[in-house]
Amino acid sequence: MKTVLIIANPKAGKGKPLKNLPEVQNHLQSIGYISETYFTQNTTDYEGIQGAIDALKKLDCLVVIGGDGTLNDIVNSIPVDFRIPIILLPCGSGNDFATYLYGKRTIPEILNSLLKNEIITINIGECNGQKFINGLGIGFDGWVAKKANAGATWIPVLLKYNLAILQGLFTYKSFYTNLGQSLIIAIANGPTYGGGFRIAPQADPTDELLDLWQIKPIAVAKRPYFLSLIKKGGHATIPGPYSHQTLKEITIQCYKNLPAHMDGEYFEAERFEVKMLEMKVGFLV
């Protein structure tokens, strides 16, 4: 029988991985797979994930139960020559990359990708030595990510995210970098982040290019319109205070530490050295 390693983040999506684990294990068994399970111990549990993978001499697939942050941990745990295909089950808060891969498919339907054995190869980016797979947001986006990851745990993350956007619409100030004055600088591999915020609608994570969208300063009175437009991806076709380019590498120098997020995980930096890596990861679809 073939072997699957399940990597589950028990803290993702208010416990969704734990609730869905029995269904995952039972379905894998029903289609002829033996499964082993590793629970991540904390954020950036790279050594634990690597150890769980290395402990299995024969591994046919890695099944990740979590969200974009959990997938980020996987990407930063595996070596550049990793050739084992991955399945990502949407059990996090935003699930942007899983939505890109699988749309609205159910967990059993996604696991049935094991039977089709069709693989899509995804590019991996890097910022300041840390790998990312979906996207990097600097400025307003980072500030929103910080707010969404803080506060009372009983409030759904997406609700906190939307409340933070509402607050930031009226309070967040633009910032300066070597690219000029901006409200948001997004460097995207996938088309959405933040639970469906379509920041880079033309982005293709298989084309070996990163999409940079610079959202320039917007008057407070006009922010609701333009951010609503950007959330839906309308800025790709309607002129406005923003610019777009594709690239393989860029350095963004700021004049102070700025809030940022990488695959939804908050951090701060004054300098962002970003590049597309030669590393690729295969996903069963």
Image (cartoon, rainbow, N blue to C red):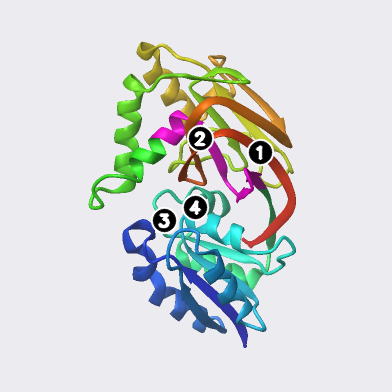
Labelled pair 3, 4 in contact (Cβ < 8 Å) = yes
Where does label 4 land, which residue?
A: 68
Measured in 3D between alpha carbons, the distance from the residue under mark 3 to the one under mark 2, in whole angstroms, is: 18 Å
The local secondary structure at tag 1 comes to strand
Looking at the rendered image, the quarter that the N terminus falls into is bottom right
**Badge 3 density bin: few <14, some 14–19, many ≥20, Cα 10 Å:** many
State left or right for residue 78 relative to residue 25: right
Residue 104 in view (yes/no):
no
Measured in 3D between alpha carbons, the distance from the residue under mark 1 to the one under mark 4, in whole angstroms, is: 19 Å
State left or right for residue 115 relative to residue 158: right
Identified by mark 2, the residue type is Arg
Q: Residue at x 59, y 70 (%)?
A: 50
The stretch drawn in magenta includes residue 276: no
Q: Which residues are magenta?
A: 125-143
Labelled pair 1, 4 in contact (Cβ < 8 Å) = no
First in sequence: mark 1 or mark 3? 3
